[in-house]
Amino acid sequence: MGARDLCYRSGQWINLGRPGSLERREYTVYSPPGSGFLDVLIREVEGGTVSQDLRCCRPGDELDVDGPHGSFVIDREAAAREKFLFVGTGTGVSPFHCFALSYPNLSYTLLHGARASGELYDSHVYDRGAFVACMSRGPAEAPAARVYPGRVTSWLRENPVEATRLCYLCGNSDMIYESYAILRSRGVPPSRIFAEVYF
């Protein structure tokens, strides 16, 4: 199956691995549907079987792909009328990259939590006024319109969030639980908060 044969919605994930290996990992698709290719954003984990194996891939190598899976998606009608808050840490920015490229008129604010500017993957694709780089470590310098020197959860505590926004959270479970609690305290109903946990 080639990339052109995989039908998926922005925000969905695939299981990916090398042929013949029993090891697979879940990765959110990074490229928008209809692009003609399939991108995933992978952070190499020291001692990680799949990430290190995939790092050794060369152009033309075959991979096993299973999917797509997941319901962390945006309804097309909602994309046209709603305002969104996206909160992602590390490679948890993947679905938001896909959303931004899939819906060019999307109204959103994206908080991307990273330890250093090198982890602000493709930040140039986002609307400059909508992207906030939340830098938890290192110098507060980044190729972004706005840089916040702290975690995404600190930004959420210090800045108002309209209760009418649709809020999408993607990253590690601690960030998601904390962000969820903050948003609920701001009056955002559970029906408007969606989460995808990255381990």
Image (cartoon, rainbow, N blue to C red):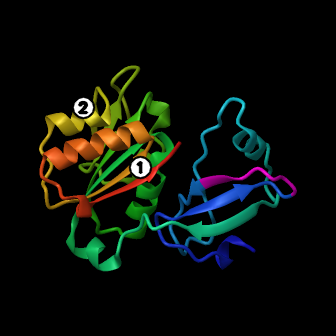
Dividing the picture into quadrants, the one containing residue 132 is: top left
**Magenta range:** 20-26
Label 1 element class: strand
Task: Please provide percent x and percent y for residue 187.
Answer: 12, 52
What mark, if any, has residue 100 been given in the picture? none
Q: Is 185 in front, or is 113? A: 185
**Visible in this render: residue 112?**
no
Q: Magenta stretch mostly in which secondary structure? A: loop
- Please identify the quadrant where the N terminus is shown: bottom right
Label 2 element class: helix
Q: Residue at x 13, y 47 (%)?
A: 186
User: What is the three-letter code of the residue carrying label 1?
Assistant: Cys
Q: Is 184 in front, or is 139? A: 184
* Disc 2 residue crowd, few under 14, some 14–19, many 20+, Cα 10 Å: some
Q: Spot the residue most to the right.
A: 20
Task: Please provide percent x and percent y for residue 175.
Answer: 37, 38
Residue 160 vertical position relative to residue 20 in the rendered view, above or below: above
Side of 108 relative to 137 (left or right)? left
* Residue at the disc numbered 2: 154
Side of 67 relative to 85 (left or right)? right
Q: Residue at x 28, y 26 (%)?
A: 149
What mark, if any, has residue 170 been given in the picture? 1
Residue 70 vertical position relative to residue 21 in the rendered view, above or below: below
Q: Residue at x 41, y 49 (%)?
A: 170
